[in-house]
Image (cartoon, rainbow, N blue to C red):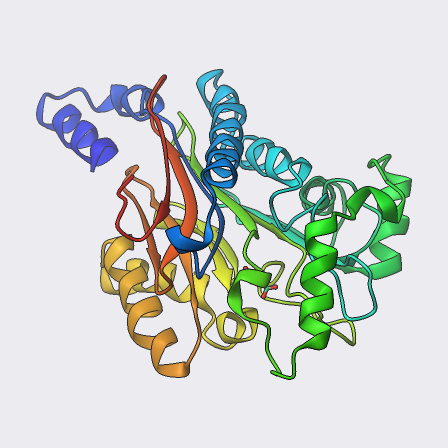
């Protein structure tokens, strides 16, 4: 409500020409996630928990530096995501989960809420930071979604950093694949995929942006692509309503068109983003049998994290020295 009340006040005081000035002065916000799933205190060591909290804090600081310096929401989202892609703890970039064939195939998307420009990549294997490639697709190509070898040819042409397959490999993710291959269950237990990363931001000029990056689900086959790079499913931003990044079992998020549905409820029904996210995740998705969550940010700076699992790596920063992170369901940001 902050921008709105500033505008109303300006109108009441006859200061209409200053409305833009008021909006420009709005406090930036950055909200991030590092995946949702079965995250119980019993299965977590203090050391590991501390590492996750540090990784989230680092991403918040990197992204907020951009916003604080007057940078755009899109640049802040990408800076926060790059930080988590470079961190082997998260299932994105270095540390991505393995496919059934023992490879890392990564997906990412970014969307500018102000212009509704979007870029995405799917099934890339050698791109150090898939979010930067998604950004290049958005800013430097006539397309929205590039896949596989073609996306990597484009990366090469645009000077995007590539790395050999070993760079992405971590022992922990390899062991997860081994467990997955030994298991007879069709689907891996949720901890095997937790770690997808995402960010939503509001900059000083009131622009929203959203981005998501993932290695997908452990043991995936046949070039499977999840919701993260699908605009409207795992990633969506539209000013002035909302910006959304999702994490969870992608097949459900695609069919429920989760990110777009949340923003559409805000736009057409006038719901608050949190209310819209609750309906979509806790009513619709649950009924369909899906699990996961979203981070949602409104054009007025109100944010929320909604998930139907017992944990979600998450964090927010809405002012200098105002960064907070959380993991478990019973924690608040
Ligand atoms: N949504 C991602 C996918 O289905 C995975 C996740 O967020 O955990 O590929």
Label total for image: 0
Residue 209 at least partly seen = no
Q: Along the line of sight, which residue is nearer the eye, 285 or 310?
A: 310
Give the quadrant of residue 88.
Answer: top right
Residue 312 spot, x, y in % from top left? 41, 52
Quadrant containing the C terminus is top left
Residue 139 at least partly seen = yes
For residue 276, above or below residue 77: below
Residue drawn at the location 48% of the way across and 19% of the way down? 70
Residue 201 spot, x, y in % from top left? 44, 37
Horizontal placement of 205 versus 152: left or right?
left
Give the quadrant of residue 155.
Answer: top right
Quadrant containing the N terminus is top left
For residue 278, above or below residue 7: below
Q: Along the line of sight, which residue is nearer the eye, 320 or 48?
A: 48
Residue 286 spot, x, y in % from top left? 35, 76
Residue drawn at the location 52% of the way across and 27% of the way down? 58
Residue drawn at the location 90% of the way across and 44% of the way down? 164
């Amino acid at each position: 409500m902050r921008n709105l009340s500033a505008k109303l006040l300006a109108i009441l005081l006859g200061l209409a020409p200053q409305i833009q000035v008021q909006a420009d002065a709005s406090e930036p916000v950055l909200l991030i996630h590092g995946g949702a799933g079965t995250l119980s205190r019993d299965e977590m060591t203090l050391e590991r928990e501390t590492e996750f909290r540090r990784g989230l804090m680092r991403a918040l600081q990197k992204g907020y530096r951009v916003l604080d310096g007057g940078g755009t929401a899109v640049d802040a989202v990408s800076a926060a995501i790059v930080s988590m892609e470079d961190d082997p703890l998260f299932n994105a970039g270095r540390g991505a989960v393995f496919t059934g064939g023992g490879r890392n195939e990564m997906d990412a998307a970014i969307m500018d809420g102000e212009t509704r420009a979007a870029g995405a990549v799917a099934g890339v294997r050698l791109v150090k930071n898939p979010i930067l490639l998604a950004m290049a697709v958005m800013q430097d190509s006539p397309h929205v979604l590039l896949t596989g070898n073609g996306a990597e040819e484009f990366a090469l042409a645009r000077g995007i950093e590539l790395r050999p397959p070993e760079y992405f490999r971590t022992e922990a993710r390899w062991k997860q694949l081994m467990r997955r291959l030994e298991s007879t269950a069709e689907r891996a237990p949720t901890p095997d995929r937790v770690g997808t990363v995402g960010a939503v931001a509001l900059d000083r000029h009131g622009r929203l942006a959203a981005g998501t990056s993932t290695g997908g689900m452990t043991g995936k086959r046949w070039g499977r692509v999840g919701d993260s790079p699908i605009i409207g499913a795992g990633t969506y931003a539209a000013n002035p309503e909302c910006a959304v990044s999702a994490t969870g079992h992608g097949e459900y998020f695609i069919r429920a068109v989760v990110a777009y549905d949340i923003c559409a409820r805000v736009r057409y029904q006038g719901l608050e983003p949190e209310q819209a996210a609750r309906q979509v995740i806790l009513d619709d998705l649950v009924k369909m049998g899906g699990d996961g969550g979203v981070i949602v940010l409104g054009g007025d700076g109100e944010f929320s994290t909604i998930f139907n699992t017992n944990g979600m790596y998450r964090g927010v920063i809405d002012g200098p020295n105002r960064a907070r992170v959380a993991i478990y369901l019973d924690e608040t940001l």
